[in-house]
Amino acid sequence: MIIAPSILSADYANFADGVKMINASGAGYVHIDIMDGVFVPPISFGQETVAALRPLSSLVFDVHLMTVNPGHHIESFAKAGADSITFHLEACPDAAEIKGIIDSIHSLDKKAGVSIKPLSPVSLLEPYLSLIDLVLIMTVEPGYGGQKLIPECLDKVRELVEIRKKLGLSFPIEIDGGVNLETAPLAKKAGVDILVTGSSFFNAPNKKTFVEAIS
Ligand code: DX5
Ligand code: ZN
């Protein structure tokens, strides 16, 4: 299991500290939640923050675009230091746009991820599964850390594991939202490969112990 702490829940007055805590925790990824105030109500942070944090960590920068027009932001986040860029299918008008964004991420030698919100069906993902490097199943309504994991979203993970097997594919499945000591074992059982965790990680007194406990 790969653990991806989300800096959305870090101290906004000191992101450098937050990244250093992630570096020391045994996590494999830094999950970076980009919010534009349109696709989701809050505005979080942007390219400049990613670029400023890049030199502080050799971990995978796992950028999650919760924005409209994700295609407009691929190059700038790739340049800022993203290793993997995930965008929402619900933010795109059609399959051509989605395939175009996946291509543009790959043309910049980055990993391409697609994500769906809790109410979106797994079937939405099917046309793209052979093209992508990662699927992010939201287990909360995107926009805020500290929410409760929606258990029905783990059914979508189980469904996606079956589809992946049937298609003979091997993309990792990531979940984001409400991951903690109670929900992590349920996610693992459902077949999740990467766990995003924000508030539980940054509230944990000992981050290394927490990462070990949910791995
Ligand atoms: C929702 C955010 C959060 C965050 C994780 O849009 O993506 O899910 O990463 O926050 P917690 O772990 O506090 O739910
Ligand atoms: Zn996220």
Image (spheres, rainbow, N blue to C red):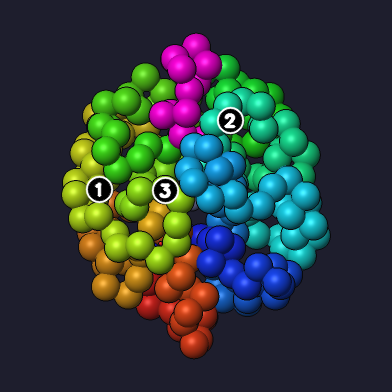
**Three-letter residue code for mark 2:** Pro
Residue 65 is at least partly visible in this image: no
Q: Find out if the beta carbon at label 3 lies less than 8 Å from the nearest ligand 1 atom.
A: yes
Q: Residue 16 lies in magenta, yes or no?
A: no
Can you say whether 24 is above or below 68 in the image? Answer: below
Q: How crowded is mark 3: few (under 14 residues within 10 Å), some or many (20 or more)?
A: many
For marks 2 and 1, the one nearer the N-term is: 2
Label 1 to label 3: alpha-carbon separation: 13 Å
Picture disc at residue 153? 1
Quarter of the image that includes the C terminus: bottom left
Classify residue 59 by image quadrant: bottom right
Q: In front here: 157 or 73?
A: 73
> Given the image, on which type of amino acid does mark 1 rest?
Cys
Percent coordinates x, y for residue 170 in the rendering: 39, 38
Residue tagged 2: 70
Circle count: 3
Which residue position holds label 3? 142
Q: Is mark 3 on a helix, strand or loop?
A: loop
Q: Position of residue 2 (x, y in %)?
A: 46, 60
Whether residue 196 sits left or right of residue 178 in the image: it is: right
Q: Which callout, 3 or 2, points at the residue further toward the start of the chain?
A: 2
Does the residue tagged 2 have its C-beta within 8 Å of any atom of ligand 2?
A: no
Q: Quick one: label 2, few (<14), some, or many (20+) residues within 10 Å?
A: many
Q: Which residue is drawn at 54% across and 31% down?
A: 68
Sequence-wise first label, 1 or 3: 3
x, y percent for residue 164: 30, 34
Q: In this view, does 130 lie above or below 199?
A: above
Residue type, label 3: Pro
Give, as a single range, the part of the protein colored magenta: 87-98
